Amino acid sequence: MSTTATDIGHRVTSIEGLPPWGPWKTGLAILRRDLFVTGREFPIFLGQVILQPLFLLFVFGKVLTELGYARPGYEQVLFPGLVALAAVLTGLQSTALPLVIEFSYSNEIEDRLLAPLPIGAVAVEKVIFAAMRACVAAAVMFPIGVWILGAIPWQAGTAVAVIVMTVLGSLLGAAMGLILGTYVPPNRINVTFALVLTPLIFTGSSQYPWPSLSHIRWFQIVSALNPMTYVSEGLRGLMVPNVPHIQTWICFVVAIGYLVVLMVIGMIGFIRRALG
Amino acid sequence: MTQTILESPSVGNGSAMAVEVADLVKRYPKAPKDSLAGVTFEVRRGEVFGFLGPNGAGKTTTIGILTTRVRPTRGRASVAGVDVVADPVRARRMLGVVPQLNNLDRSLSVRQNLLFHASYHGVPRARRLQLADALLDQFGLADRPNGRPDDFSGGQIQRMMIARALMHSPAVLFLDEPSTGLDPAARLFLWEKVAELKEAGTTVVITTHDMDEAATLSDRVAIIDHGTLLALDTPGALVRGMTSDRTLDCTIEPGPGGDVTVLGERLGAVPGVSQAEQLEDPVGGSWRFRIYVEGEAAPFVAPVAQVISALGGRLTDVRLGEPNLEDVFIHLTGRALR
């Protein structure tokens, strides 16, 4: 094959001679790479995100209520919480695990850190991509809910708010994962996952409405500290408004506040890891 | 042929130097002393610049700063006229990095690694497709473009990383310890490619702790230790600057009735020879002498052989002891590199 300087196009003569290029285009190219890789393994990805909520929904929403251990109607309380759980957990796992691997074992992230965009933008891309995965995980809960429960709670007027809250929950989870993935040393990640994930899952008000915890005050306070509580409660308020819940506007404000704080902490951790 | 794709972009109009470093200092948090203690040097356009030093000397820190991955504590550094501290995003468009460890994207094929890298750097689609094929060809990877990096040998991985780094036509290519862990054939291939890059005008900065590599590849060598630049010159000039003696190690088959003491005296009397010292002969039956001379050693081979044959003996083996980069290094740092 013959290739000459002229037929392969321009030759760079200086930074001024390079074609104009915005860092956001590099960010999009990196996002395209992530989508390309995930798209190729989409069935595996779906299996990964579906199984846990599927079983939770089936056992708690279907089995327990049919056996009479949970009151009828519990599945309506549970469903919004499981959507929140799917969003937050998938977001978290989609940033934390890849970051730990890429920073320590594979070094794959280096090629992106050497790409022409600010280092912080690499972290933002990671969070956005993880949130996209988390939104898919949350979205598939709806057909699964219909399939297992027969019907899912739904208010016609709140669809947009449900979507916004789900996106917020996905971003929150991804931001938490950014913190875990950058601050936790690789040899501790297993322990940390066990220590963080279990409390996160069970104090996030996904299996119960938060106001109903008033009899167990300490647990209510602990749950109030978990960012996921505001996603669960927000979705619950939007989908089953007759169940007692934290006011929806409070959920939005606190979730956004948490997102900002977690992102700032996560970005500091990321930049510290990325720069020697 | 494909040679031309390796043609380098020439560096920015404003700067005659490909790399400029001034008073560069780096102290890592909590470190007791500076990892780089004020380093200043320049790399000219189109040259192969070798960075020679032991592990922990400051090579990797310097390369880290130049490739925007490490922030210096003080000092200035620029690549192709772009300040790497003030404007790292633009600087990354001008430099290519081949790291020590495999950092290829394991989820992508060889060809996809090249293509996505180019897309991060804004290389237009048509050009990156063409470049990827040409570079795969050039680097002997064209037969398995769709293989995953994990299925290749260390030498091939390294070729992939060089090909990837060339996808955005960097003005300066940084190779960090490129031949570590390579077998001799892969090492030779690498050296050939670096020579080709130089021929095509690419500036190459290479770190190594291998003397041969530094001497063979580099136009100029910087010797660094404890964060300080100890010497910077062509390999030849560094060696010539050494004051240590040149030697001839001779093995002599004595003639009938030859006298080793007389031979020693005659050899010592050759003009320019400062001393002739008899060495132990491990095999037996031959005599061995180390002859210390002033200036270059080679011109002494003929007169020494004449003296030997005049006494009826025969010079069967001679080894010239020229100081090499290793001696330069030992002289400068007081210790061996490896």
Image: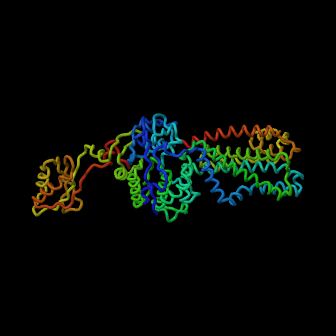
Q: Position of residue A22 (x, y in %)?
A: 58, 44
Relative depth, front residue between B35 and B65: B65
- Give the color scheme: rainbow, by chain, secondary structure or one colour: rainbow
- Residue A203 appears in the rendering: no
Depth check: give the residue in front, B208 or B269: B208
Kindly identify the residue that appears in the image at 72 percent across and 55 percent down: A49
Give the quadrant of residue A260: top right
Q: On the picture, is B72 further left or further right than A139?
A: left
Q: Quadrant of residue B225?
A: top left
Q: Is residue A191 above or below residue B188?
A: above
Which residue is more in the foreground, A213 or B10? B10
Could you say where residue A155 lies in the image, as x and y percent from the top left? Answer: 86, 48
Front one among B151 and B92 = B92
In the orientation shown, which residue stands out farthest toward the front? A6
Residue B40: x %, y % from top left: 40, 37
Tell me if B227 is positioned left or right of A117 in this view: left
**Which residue is drawn at the image coordinates 42% and 35% (left, top)?**
B23
Quadrant placement of the N terminus of chain B: bottom left
Residue at the far bottom in the pictured view: B143
Q: Is residue B243 visible?
A: yes
Is residue A150 shown above or below B11?
Answer: below
Look at the picture and state if B127 lies above or below B239: below
**Count of numbered labels shown in the rendering:** 0
Residue at the (54%, 55%) spot, across then down: B104
Please provide percent x and percent y for residue A267: 62, 40
